[in-house]
Image (cartoon, rainbow, N blue to C red):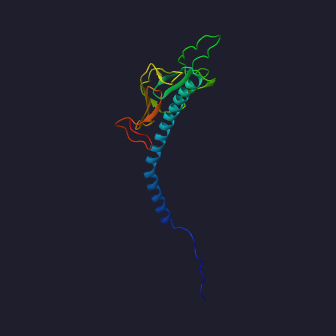
Amino acid sequence: MQLQTRGMWGFTLIELMASVAVLAVVLASAVPSFVDFFDKYRLRGAAEGAITLISSARSEAVKNDLDVNIAMAGSGATWCMGANAAAQPSGGSPATTATECDCTDTAACLVSGQRAAIDVGAYPDVRVGSLPPATTFDGKLGAIVPLGTRSLTLTSPRGKYDLAVEINALGQARLCVPTGKPVIAGVSPC
């Protein structure tokens, strides 16, 4: 008489522990890459938000033939940026000049009747360097008044990466990596 044994499927404890050890090594090597990815992602989001606000303010200035002013407030990780358009001319009077908006005030910073601001805390942990002076875009050409350039540097939450937002005299904004900082894919050096 012969006993029949059924095939047992499964893992032994040793096989399971070896698999867990290999998984732990793979995860440990991947965590720094994920942290780095999210650090760059947050920084790039803040920089692209600033570029979008600047470009929109400039285009609205030319479209409506009204000066638009961009101002920043705050420091470190608590900063904001907002745009404010000059009031429409009325009663034969010329348009007024655009005034700086207080981006900490949620009712301020209006362009074409819409709020145009990056609110405090919109990009948590992304820090700002020294703030540029308020910038006014001319309603006729979209150039900066008075002519000149402006620059703003944003730093990633861990401080490893920087991105500069530069506005040339014609009012065109661009994004670049400052000299001496690690490269970010798709962004040219300054």
Please tell me which residue is depicted at 48% across the width and 27% down the height of the picture: 171
Residue 42 at x, y = what percent? 50, 38
Question: Taking 111 as reference, is 42 left or right?
Answer: left
How many marks on residues? 0
Comparing 121 with 53, the one in front is 53
**View extreme (left): residue:** 180
Comparing 12 with 49, the one in front is 49
- Quick check: can you spot residue 64? yes
**View extreme (bottom): residue:** 1
Quadrant in the rendering for residue 131: top left
Residue 120 at x, y = what percent? 54, 27
Please tell me which residue is depicted at 51% across the width and 35% down the height of the picture: 48
Of the 4 image quadrants, the one containing the N terminus is bottom right
Residue 186 at x, y = what percent? 45, 43
Please tell me which residue is depicted at 57% across the width and 71% down the height of the picture: 9
- Quick check: can you spot residue 104? no
From what the image shows, is residue 2 above or below residue 174?
below
Comparing 122 with 176, the one in front is 176
Please tell me which residue is depicted at 60% across the width and 82% down the height of the picture: 4
Residue 3 at x, y = what percent? 60, 84
Quadrant in the rendering for residue 180: top left
Of the 4 image quadrants, the one containing the C terminus is top left
From what the image shows, is residue 75 above or below residue 176?
above
